[in-house]
Structure formats: C-alpha cells, structure tokens
Image (tube, grey):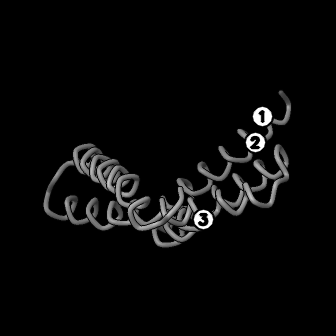
Amino acid sequence: MWWLAIKALVSGIIVAAVSEVAKRYPGVGGLIASLPLVSVLGMIWLWQAKPDAANMASHAQATFWFVLPSLPMFLVIPAMLRAGVGFYAALALGCLLTIVLYAGMLFLAPRLGIRL
C-alpha cells in the first residue's frame, strides 16, 4: 500500500511541477511535459513489480506505437484555440481525435505485423 502511495505522490508532483512551470514559462513547461517521465516511471514501477525483460521490451515497444497517434492532438488543439474555439471544446475534440487514432492504431497495427 505504501508503494502505491509513493508512486502516486511522485507522479502527482511531476504533473504539478509541469503546470506551475508552464504558468511562467510555457515552452519550458511543454518541454517538461514532453519528456517521457511518465513512461520512464511506469517502466520503473513495472520492473519493480515484474522484473521480466521480455515483458518490459513489449511494454516499451507498445508505448512507442501508442505515442504516435497521440501527437496530432498537440497540433490540433493550438490550431483550434488560435481559430477561436474555446479551450474545453478544443481539448475535447483533441482528445476525441486521439481516441479515434488510438482505435485506428489498434485496428491497423496487427495488419502491419506490429504487436501491441
């Protein structure tokens, strides 16, 4: 139970740090947010729970393939905001786009020989 609380605390601190830094320095906040901190922490937590190299390799590879469909959201949201779309609408549409692209990845990956 304590390990779960520590994982949640560390993860929460990272999210809070990103939002606080981004208030003053949006570019630096974006840089911190773009770092694969969540992925690295997830791999550490996974390795602690199940130190299995094959499982970790599969996890890391799947993470790579799932990052790709999430990237367009970071272009669509600013474009919509600059076009006058409200923040929550732009965020919702960006998230919806990402969900559709994730579904596309789940459909397309096996057909391309990619194991997720």
Mark 3, residue position: 61
Amino acid type of disc 2? Answer: Lys
Residue contact between numbered discs 2 and 1, judged by CB atoms under 8 Å: yes
Q: Indicate the position of residue 73 as horizontal and vertical percent values.
A: 33, 60
Which SS class for mark 2? helix
Tell me which residue sits at (70%, 60%) in the image.
Answer: 40
Tell me which residue sits at (47%, 66%) in the image.
Answer: 113
Q: Indicate the position of residue 14 as horizontal and vertical percent values.
A: 65, 53
Q: Is residue 33 above or below residue 90?
A: below
Mark 1, residue position: 4
Label 1 crowd bin: few (<14), some (14–19), many (20+), radius 10 Å: few
Q: How many marks?
A: 3
Numbered label attached to residue 7: 2
As measured in the structure, the alpha-carbon distance from the residue carrying label 3 to the one carrying label 1 is 25 Å
Amino acid type of disc 1? Answer: Leu
Closer to the camera in the image, 108 or 19: 108
Label 3 crowd bin: few (<14), some (14–19), many (20+), radius 10 Å: some
Q: Earlier in the sequence, mark 3 or mark 2?
A: 2
Which SS class for mark 3? helix
Tell me which residue sits at (42%, 61%) in the image.
Answer: 109
Closer to the camera in the image, 20 or 79: 79
Tell me which residue sits at (27%, 53%) in the image.
Answer: 97
Q: Nearer the viewer, mark 3 or mark 2?
A: 3
Q: Nearer the viewer, mark 3 or mark 1?
A: 3
